Image (cartoon, helix red, strand yellow):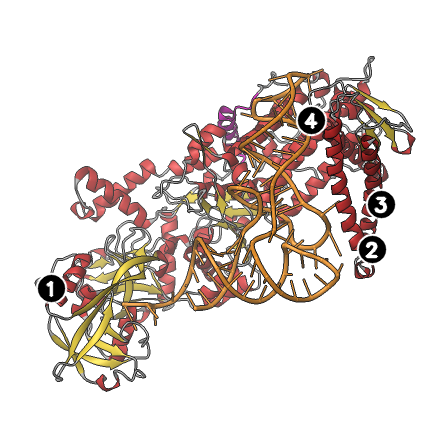
RNA sequence: GCGCGAAUAGCUCAGCGGUAGAGCAUCUCGUUUACACCGAGGCGGCCGGGGGUUCGAAUCCCUCUUCGCGCACCA
């Protein structure tokens, strides 16, 4: 047994030491050849350049809990970690750095050299988040760590592209896409976030051609695109404008006649009921233009400035400056009618945080495979969503699923595996559409480049990051050109996926489709959607808001176990988490984490109490023997509560209710064990009342403490892995012939009450309950008179049934100087008393009591009791209740009635006594 | 506009048909051989408003209000 442990728990070195030992011993390795039931999770790969935030803490703590619990349930567990190359995010970080440090752009370096720089940067900073996950205690199989741009993984990405291209699901075409003028790339619909904006609604007027002084008023938020207007549209049912359809209007600049067309899409109620149609710069306008055969004039450059089509005075001007300039010009021409403030929603690039431009451009698109299977799998619970309300969101998206724009005009990522023969490249790339039928002598689509590579040029675009992420569950396990690996055969489909609902479309839905398409099986059985971590005022924690504390700082101050426990205790199934930040003397403190730290300390000290007892008894700690005959009723009671807790915990794991798990663990330990059992056991421990000692009682107590502590450490370990492992070691609980660590010690299969007579257990529990309740009443009495500190008060008990044997424990628990058992005791006037299941407890105060105060107190209690009695009587007077409510409920109410009747009578008597 | 959440003690949240709960904060008392990162006790709730179902509603249904989040081509 180790030296005496310190008074307070110091998590720092304890945590890192144990983590190192687990890794060194290979505890986290998933055994692909294991014969036990498989349990697997693939980590949602964080961005390789990412920094741990509280969202990661939540997410990965849940995964770690599931993985550790599964190990202790005797399963072969694989938690497969890795990182994502995160195309735009990583590339922009490196570009930013180059601009800042060298004032250079990626084009100054050229593709090859720039990519070298990114790899360099990745090698330097890429490991940070992995190290942070280790500090949190995550039991990932680091020997299997993967990166989405690993060579094998990249082959998978190419293979998938080639498969889908050959099937005709991937095609290239000129389409309206979301264009990010900052990152200079196309984005998928999912990468666009709509934000409400305070903008202006400009009403301008165009002259109707051929009609003197007839004007048509048009409302727009984007006057800067009017140079690209190629039509004006009205609703065909709109009587105001019916006669205009078929005529033309004069676009003010550059001046041109543009047709007035009719289209159902126009809402006559909005603005003036007239829409300017700019097919090159608006999705809806594009559709209207297509229907009506309007010209497409693109007036914007990729970077968001205006181009030559806008006219010389606007060329090169930024789109937002041009907006003002165009309005001014209209005004100067007398064609600006009015400007109003207006709030609308504008699509922003999620990454670059600038308004996106709808833009027609040549991109690669994917028609999703296996949509029906993927939709059905979730609908029929083959893949179970928790909470299941996300099923609806998923179904809705799957139902209206749109082709996925998968090409990105970036350099960092998986370059598209398409080559064009040099002399045909330009022609091919300008084709309006390109698909499987065009592959051949001039178009090569393959995992490997064409043999005479010099004769070909490769498509410069890379694939959307999610085009690699969606393969994560299996591409991390097997190579694309081999049979499924042993790892995959053992661990795929994975068991649980833990992720944020924000990426249900980005990732979850797509993984399901990919799983069916390339593996014929769903990638996972359960999806647990976490909530979002918010700050005290409900805002999402984010770096840009600066409201997210660094988890590593919290870990340094409170310990990883405390943080884990804190976050789990406040994480109800799929609901958001409010992470409290309080300010104390200028320092930020985190009340929830303080609670976690205090809990660790409480556990630590309860273990100390055990450890401070003699060593001789501790030698048997690894296998404590419980002799039902020798145990006190309190010991039996705590064992029964432990048994209850174990069962509730098993159920809560079934239901993925992590906050309930945390609560069960906390309540059992602190309240049931520490506050009640351990206090009641101290007499036996210190051999009180047995001057000659009672070694058998003491041994039984130590065996109980060991049993409870041992089993509790096993239960708590997934939540607080470090401290539990430390205590397991300190207390010598390791079975010399068993596993080296607590973390790979299986949970006991048998109930702790196996071999106990259920009747004895029930009797003990009933008795203990009565004693504890009586103690509470007695403490109340004491506190009423400010006698908390006075240990010399005497309680006189008139016992129920004539005897009471638990005086020693009673006395200790309510801190009394003396407890006298006196059947039939008649108290003098004014002696406070409480009626309990063990009998009537009197607290003689020998004149110390203020009679008025006592009378007031009694009257208050009497009023309360009368209220209760009234409620109960009312209930029982209700015939419907008596005839229709379940028997046990009625019986309970009757019992309650009896109790309150007695209590009222008693209190009335006492008040009367006092009054005399 | 449609859909989905949430509203319970001063704060953070449990409870989701059968006497309103925890932690923190606050107040009173207390260092008794695990722990002051502690112990004992108290104060504090028309369980967002209004209707309904039921013997009985914080809990189920309807409706409204407020907040949050998705989805949608309203210029």
> Cα distance, mark 3 to mark 2?
17 Å
Quadrant housing the N terminus of chain A = top right
> Cα distance, mark 4 to mark 1?
83 Å
Residue A272 position within the rendered picture, expressed as x and y whole percent measured from the top left: 26, 74
Residue A899 position within the rendered picture, expressed as x and y whole percent measured from the top left: 82, 43
Badge 2 is on which residue? A887
Visible residue check, residue A899:
yes
> Cα distance, mark 4 to mark 2?
48 Å
Residue A26 among those drawn in magenta? yes
- Using the image as rendered, state which of residue A246 and residue A399 is in the foreground: A246
Local secondary structure at mark 1: helix
Along the horizontal axis of the image, is A482 left or right of A430?
right
- Using the image as rendered, state which of residue A721 and residue A770 is in the foreground: A770
Local secondary structure at mark 4: loop
Label pair 4/2, CB-CB below 8 angstroms:
no
Badge 3 is on which residue? A898
Residue A151 among those drawn in magenta? no
Q: Is residue A906 above or below residue A276?
A: above
Residue segment shown in magenta: A8-33
Residue A719 position within the rendered picture, expressed as x and y whole percent measured from the top left: 57, 37
Please tell me the numbered disc located at residue A308.
1
Local secondary structure at mark 2: helix
Local secondary structure at mark 3: helix
Q: Earlier in the sequence, mark 2 or mark 1?
A: 1
Tag nearer the camera, 1 or 3: 3
């Amino acid at each position: 047994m180790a030296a005496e442990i310190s008074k307070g728990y110091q998590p720092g070195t304890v945590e890192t030491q144990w983590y190192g030992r687990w890794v060194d011993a290979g505890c986290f390795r998933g055994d692909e050849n294991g014969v036990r039931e498989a349990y697997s999770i693939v980590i949602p790969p964080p961005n390789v350049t990412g920094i741990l935030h509280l969202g990661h803490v939540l997410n990965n703590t849940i995964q770690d809990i599931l993985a550790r619990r599964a190990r202790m349930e005797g399963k072969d567990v694989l938690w497969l970690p890795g990182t994502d190359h995160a195309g735009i995010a990583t590339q922009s970080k490196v570009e930013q750095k180059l601009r800042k440090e060298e004032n250079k752009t990626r084009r100054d370096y050229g593709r090859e050299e720039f990519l070298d720089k990114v790899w360099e940067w990745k090698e330097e900073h890429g490991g940070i988040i992995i190290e942070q996950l280790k500090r949190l205690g995550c039991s990932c199989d680091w020997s299997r760590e993967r990166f989405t741009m690993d060579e094998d993984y990249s082959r998978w990405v190419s293979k998938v592209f080639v498969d889908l291209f050959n099937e005709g699901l991937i095609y290239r075409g000129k389409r309206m896409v979301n264009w990010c003028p900052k990152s200079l790339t196309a984005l998928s619909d999912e990468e666009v976030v709509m934000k409400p904006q305070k903008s202006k609604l400009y009403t301008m007027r165009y002259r109707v051609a051929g009609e003197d002084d007839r004007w048509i008023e048009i409302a727009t938020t984007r006057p800067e695109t009017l140079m690209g207007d190629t039509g004006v549209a009205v609703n065909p049912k709109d009587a105001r404008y019916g006669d205009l359809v078929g005529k033309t209007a004069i676009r003010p600049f550059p001046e041109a006649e543009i047709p007035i067309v009719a289209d159902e899409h126009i809402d006559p109620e909005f603005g003036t009921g007239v829409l300017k149609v700019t097919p090159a710069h608006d999705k809806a306008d594009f559709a209207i233009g297509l229907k009506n055969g309007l010209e497409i004039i693109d007036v914007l450059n990729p970077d968001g400035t205006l181009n030559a089509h806008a006219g010389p005075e606007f060329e090169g001007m930024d789109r937002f400056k041009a907006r003002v300039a165009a309005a001014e010009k209209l005004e100067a021409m007398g064609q600006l009618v009015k400007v109003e403030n207006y709030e609308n929603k504008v699509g922003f690039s999620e990454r670059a945080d600038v308004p996106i431009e709808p833009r027609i451009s040549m991109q690669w698109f994917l028609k999703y495979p296996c949509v029906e299977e993927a939709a059905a799998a979730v609908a029929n619970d083959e893949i179970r969503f928790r909470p299941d309300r996300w099923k609806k969101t998923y179904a809705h998206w799957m139902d209206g699923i749109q082709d996925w724009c998968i090409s990105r005009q970036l350099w960092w990522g998986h370059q598209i595996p398409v080559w064009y023969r040099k002399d045909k490249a330009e022609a091919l790339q300008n084709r309006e559409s390109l698909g499987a039928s065009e592959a051949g002598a001039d178009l090569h689509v393959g995992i490997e480049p064409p043999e005479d590579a010099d004769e070909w040029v490769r498509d410069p675009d890379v694939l959307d990051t999610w085009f690699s992420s969606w393969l994560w569950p299996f591409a991390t396990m097997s190579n694309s050109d081999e049979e499924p690996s042993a790892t995959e055969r053992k661990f795929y489909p994975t068991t649980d996926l833990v992720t944020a609902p924000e990426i249900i479309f980005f990732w979850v839905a797509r993984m399901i489709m990919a799983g069916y398409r390339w593996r014929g099986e769903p990638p996972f059985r359960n999806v647990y959607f976490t909530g979002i971590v918010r700050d005290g005022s409900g805002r999402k924690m984010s770096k840009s808001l600066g409201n997210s504390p660094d988890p590593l700082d919290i870990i340094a101050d409170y310990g990883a176990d405390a943080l884990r426990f804190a976050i789990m205790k406040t994480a109800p199934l799929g609901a958001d988490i409010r992470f409290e930040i309080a300010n104390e003397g200028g320092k930020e403190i985190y009340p929830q984490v303080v609670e976690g730290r205090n809990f660790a300390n409480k556990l630590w000290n309860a273990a100390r109490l055990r450890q401070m007892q003699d060593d001789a008894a501790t030698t048997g700690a690894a296998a404590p023997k419980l002799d039902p005959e020798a145990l006190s009723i309190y010991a039996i009671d705590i064992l029964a509560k432990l048994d209850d807790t174990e069962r509730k915990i098993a159920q809560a794991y079934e239901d993925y209710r992590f906050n309930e798990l945390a609560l069960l663990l906390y309540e059992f330990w602190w309240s049931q064990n520490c506050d009640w059992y351990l206090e009641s056991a101290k007499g036996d421990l210190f051999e009180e009342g047995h001057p000659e000692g009672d070694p058998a009682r003491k041994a039984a107590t130590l065996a109980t403490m060991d049993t409870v502590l041992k089993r509790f450490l096993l239960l708590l370990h997934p939540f607080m892995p470090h401290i539990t492992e430390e205590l397991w070691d300190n207390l010598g609980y390791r079975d010399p012939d068993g596993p080296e660590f607590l973390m790979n010690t299986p949970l006991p299969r048998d109930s702790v009450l196996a071999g106990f007579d259920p009747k004895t257990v029930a009797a003990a529990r009933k008795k203990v309950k009565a004693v504890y309740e009586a103690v509470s009443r007695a403490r109340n009495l004491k506190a009423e008179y400010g006698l908390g500190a006075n240990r010399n008060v005497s309680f006189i008990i008139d016992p129920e049934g004539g005897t009471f044997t638990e005086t020693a424990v009673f006395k200790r628990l309510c801190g009394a100087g003396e407890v006298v058992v006196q059947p039939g005791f008649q108290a003098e006037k004014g002696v406070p008393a409480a009626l309990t299941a063990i009998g009537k407890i009197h607290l003689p105060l020998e004149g110390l009591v203020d009679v008025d105060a006592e009378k007031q107190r009694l009257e208050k209690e009497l009023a309360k009791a009368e209220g209760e009695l009234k409620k109960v009587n009312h209930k029982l007077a209700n015939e419907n209740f008596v005839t229709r409510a379940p028997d046990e409920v009625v019986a309970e109410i009757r019992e309650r009635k009896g109790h309150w009747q007695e209590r009222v009578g008693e209190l009335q008597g006492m008040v009367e006594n006092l009054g005399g």
